[in-house]
Image (spheres, helix red, strand yellow):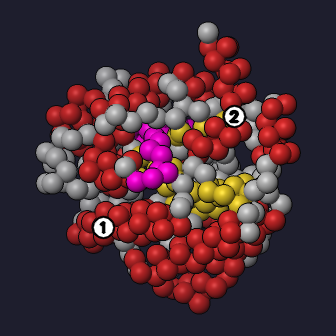
Amino acid sequence: MDRILKNAELTRKGIFIISLDFELYWGLRDIFSLDQPLRAKLLSARSAIPALLNLFVEYEIHATWATVGMLFCESRNELLSTAPSIKPQYTRRQLSPYQEMERIGQHETRDPYHYAPSLIRLISSTPHQEIGTHTFSHYYCLEDGQDLDTFQADLSAAVKAAKRLELKIESIVFPYNQVNPNYLQTCAEFGVKTYRGNNAGWTYAPRRKDRESQLRRAIRLADSYVNLSGHNTYDPAEIDSGFPMNLPSSRYLRMYSNPLRGLEPLRLARIRNEMAHAARHRRIYHLYLHPEGLGSHFEKNMSFLRKILDHFALARDRNEMESLNMRETFQKYGARTADDANSNLR
């Protein structure tokens, strides 16, 4: 902890982290049927990812892509063979993807909604992009019917799937932001060094899906446009000294909404003000998004993101802010924490 504090005192820049929850249909299947409009949206999202990577290269953005492990598989046979032998028995059966695995397509060409090895290779070959995990099966860590044993099996499968593409998993984003503190030790045992925690405050605290309230949703929506929860930045010295290291989110990047189009200037100002606070006070700002959302209103969403990155570039050029992915942020602040954790594991 002393080393973390010392590094925080010496740092001259704020940190801009971007993380992406890369899921395709695995993150939507318990809510939406794979009808033609959704198929079109997911295909648009796949087309958007190369454009997004080009934007990141242009602005020298370092990002973490938390990817569902099933997307790594080349074929249905590989997916079935990689799946863990023990699986969560969710009380709400629709949460489990395993019941429909026999019905998906044979490979990425025939079924671009359930496979993405070509996109994962493209992302990993792009400078400064980290491939993290979003668990193997989009695993819900707080729902009834799951437990530590099935989470361990799921994470093992995610690491195995990534290894086939010669990728090492060091960061995790818990699906639906269901951070379960009881599972962090298991993450450390599998080599995970960082995770994205939740914003501070009850509005953003992790919940089971069936316990989410309309009030919380409404407050979070309003908070995207007006300042209800503060700047949502944090000092490097405030980073949890536990291992894996917690890098809490600051803001979910909502996509363009036609009914709310008149509020777009407020949405942009909200994010810019938070980033300016982070740059001015040398704090961390962690923005996250779902690339699947880019497909709808693609031009408007990309234009909005470019305005955010323009704001970052101004701070970077003033030597006030730098872009780091989750792994790099750990490398900058978490070495002491990792050494202590490894000693405990031994």
- The residue identified by callout 1 is 47
Q: Position of 71 compared to 319: left or right?
A: left
Are there few (<14), some (14-19), or many (20+) residues within 10 Å of tag 2? many
The residue under the point 64% across, 37% down is 331
Residue position for label 2: 334
Which of the labelled discs sits on residue 216, or is there none? none
Query: Where on the picture, by quarter, is residue 41?
Result: bottom left
Q: Which residue lies furthest to the top in this view?
A: 346
Sequence order check: which comes first, mark 1 or mark 2? Answer: 1
> Residue flagged by tag 1: what amino acid is it?
Ser
Span highlighted in magenta in the image: 126-145
Task: Give whichever of 290, 12 is nearer the camera.
Answer: 12
Q: CA gap, disc 1 to disc 2?
A: 36 Å
x, y percent for residue 90: 43, 36
Q: Is residue 141 magenta?
A: yes
Q: Where is residue 14 in the image (x, y as percent from the top left)?
A: 74, 57
Q: Which residue lies furthest to the bottom in this view?
A: 262
> Mark 1 Cα within 10 Å, few/some/many (few <14, many 20+)?
some
Q: Does the magenta stretch include residue 87?
A: no
On screen, 193 above or below 198? above
Q: Is residue 329 above or below residue 245?
A: below
Residue 267 can be seen in this image? no
Kindly report the secondary structure that dominates the magenta region of the rendered protein.
Answer: loop
Residue at 80% across / 32% down in the picture? 3
Q: Where is residue 75 in the image (x, y as percent from the top left)?
A: 18, 40
Q: Is mark 1 on a helix, strand or loop?
A: helix
In the picture, measured across the screen, residue 178 lies left or right of residue 155, that is right
* Residue 42 in the figure: left or right of residue 198: left
